[in-house]
Amino acid sequence: MDCLTEFLLTDWVYATVSVVVVFVILLNITILMVWLERKIVADMQDRLGPMRAGPFGILQTVADGIKLLFKEQIMPSRAEKWVYLLAPAIAVITAFLMFLVVPIAKPISVLINGQIRTLDFVVMDLNIGVLYILAISSIAVYAVVLAGWSSGSKYPLLGGVRATAQAISYEAAMGLSLVSVVMYSSLADIGGVNNGLSVSHLVELQSGTLENIFGGRAAFLLKFVPAWNVWPLIIPFAIFIIAALAETNRAPFDLAEAEQEIVGGFHTEYSGMRFAMFFLAEYVNIFTMSAVGASLFLGGYHFPPFDGLVGWLGVFLSFGVFITKVMAIFFLFIWLRASVPRFRYDQLMTLGWKILLPLTLINLMVTGAVVLWLEA
Amino acid sequence: MFESIVSQLRTFWTVLMHTFTGYETVQYPEEMPYLAPRYRGRIVLTRDPDGVERCVACNLCAVACPVDCIALQKTEDEDGRWYPEFFRINFSRCIMCGFCEEACPTYSIQLTPDFEMCEYDRQNMVYEKEHLLIDGPGKYPDYSFYNVAGKSIAGKAKGEAENEAPPVDIRDLLP
């Protein structure tokens, strides 16, 4: 038994296992998310939604997946073959890669062969986690752009062009909204270790209640407020959600696929499993963006009443808390999709450059000033 | 600006509240939707209260039909009644517009609230007279064309129909 545990905890085995676990979790949760979205949107529109496959249509996504798997894959004769084949792969790979740095549960210390090992439930705790998320999410746009360009067809090209403009407009706002999280977190970061950009570190700083951060000068009530970044950083959170919607090509920013105007946009010419790749990537992206939002703004796996729990019970509860928060943000995504009509191209650019970017810059200045004032 | 924000928030609220309202759609084959009696579905040919078919083969329905799905041929029986020799509706073309029903002078052709006419073979979508004729009078239970029309048939001479005056002798000069 000890032998087995020791083998499982060698670095490369541990890394492999955690990669596989995260991969499986993401795949399964995607299936659930597609079903959930269809059911919730149907509910909001007074429809029933999928009802046939399995109880309440819960197997609908599986049925769709099998259907797509067996469908013919058509490639336009004017497509750029290699780029055309590469684009869905980029979409899926980047979607899964982004999740690497997000911690999904509380770390636990276990005693093995007399030495204490810490199991952190994050695949790769990079010390540049936030930068990594931004970088990968930018690469994810390449999938859309390349798919649109290489299809050799008008509608996908339009979709690709739209995706490019959209990505450039919203990347800046998203990056700057995350900067204020890092700035604010330096308040609580007493040790001042050199990993202020690591996502799990940023999550760790949000444990407990606001009392931990504002200490003596705060009122008694702060004892009951979780120390999540969302309270002081509500504006960056709103901007992050908007930018995440744009980044994942979700309604109301789904101009790149806009079925009514450009018949599916960048994935018009994709069929069968190649289309399924884009579909999968979209939902994994949504999950990851929700997870990043939950980790950086909503305290990740932290929920004050459960923070004191130790052992595996604490781990499982913290995982449940994390999933709940992610699903809450995902619900917000669905809710927005059901309520808001699609933006026009110029409205999208106006919102990105003339409203969100100045707003983030002003917010950054204010956050910086307040942080300096509180530290002094 | 402020008003538009409030309007957006109200939209979100309304949409959210609709999650908890009922459904407009039904689980179709198990649960049938309500169809009004005058719903425009499958076309039928009706009969008089006496059980004689109402159609007088005037061809107005075929003329009114925008998709030309009705075909018929007039013939006459020994009583002097007109009736269609054949009456054919191609339901793979029919768009259920109801123009034929409106054009019909004898209330013969009527649309019913039934839309379940699926067939595996397209040829089976062509209904002949024996498929179209029903036993009853449909929506107008008391109406009988020859009882109100001036045309003379066996057993009913001119001037004997309801609300009809006896025929005037046009060669008679007396008032």
Image (tube, coloured by chain):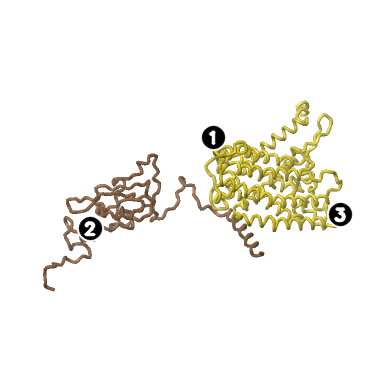
Chain colours: A yellow, B brown
> Which of label 1 and label 2 is nearer to you?
1
Instruction: Measure the alpha-carbon separation of dots 3 and 2.
Output: 102 Å
Q: What is the quadrant of residue A301 in the picture?
A: top right
Q: Identity of the amino acid at label 2? A: Tyr
According to the picture, the residue beneath numbered tag 2 turns out to be: B146
The answer to whether residue A21 is above or below residue A176 is above
Q: Amino acid at mark 1?
A: Phe
Give the SS element for disc 1.
loop
Mark 3 and mark 2 in contact? Answer it, CB < 8 Å: no
| Same chain? Circles 3 and 2 | no
User: Which type of secondary structure does the marked residue at label 2 adopt?
Assistant: helix
Residue A240, position in %: x, y? 71, 51
Q: CA distance from mark 1 to mark 3?
A: 61 Å
Q: Amino acid at mark 3?
A: Glu
Q: Nearer the viewer, residue A356 or A319?
A: A356
Q: Position of residue A327 (x, y in %)?
A: 66, 47
Residue A309 showing in the rendered view? yes
The subunit letter for the residue under badge 2 reads B
Mark 3 — on which chain does it sit?
A
Indicate the quadrant containing the N terminus of chain B: top left, top right, bottom left or bottom right: bottom right
Chain of the residue that carries numbered disc 1 in the rendered image: A
At label 2, counting other C-alpha atoms closer than 10 Å, the crowd grade (few under 14, some 14-19, many 20 or more) is some
Kindly identify the residue that appears in the image at 66 percent across and 36 percent down.
A24
Query: Which of the two discs, 1 and 3, sits closer to the camera?
Result: 1
SS category of the residue bearing label 3: helix
Residue at 40% x, 48% y: name it: B115
Residue bearing the label numbered 3 = A375
Task: Please determine if labels 1 and 2 lie on a single subunit.
Answer: no
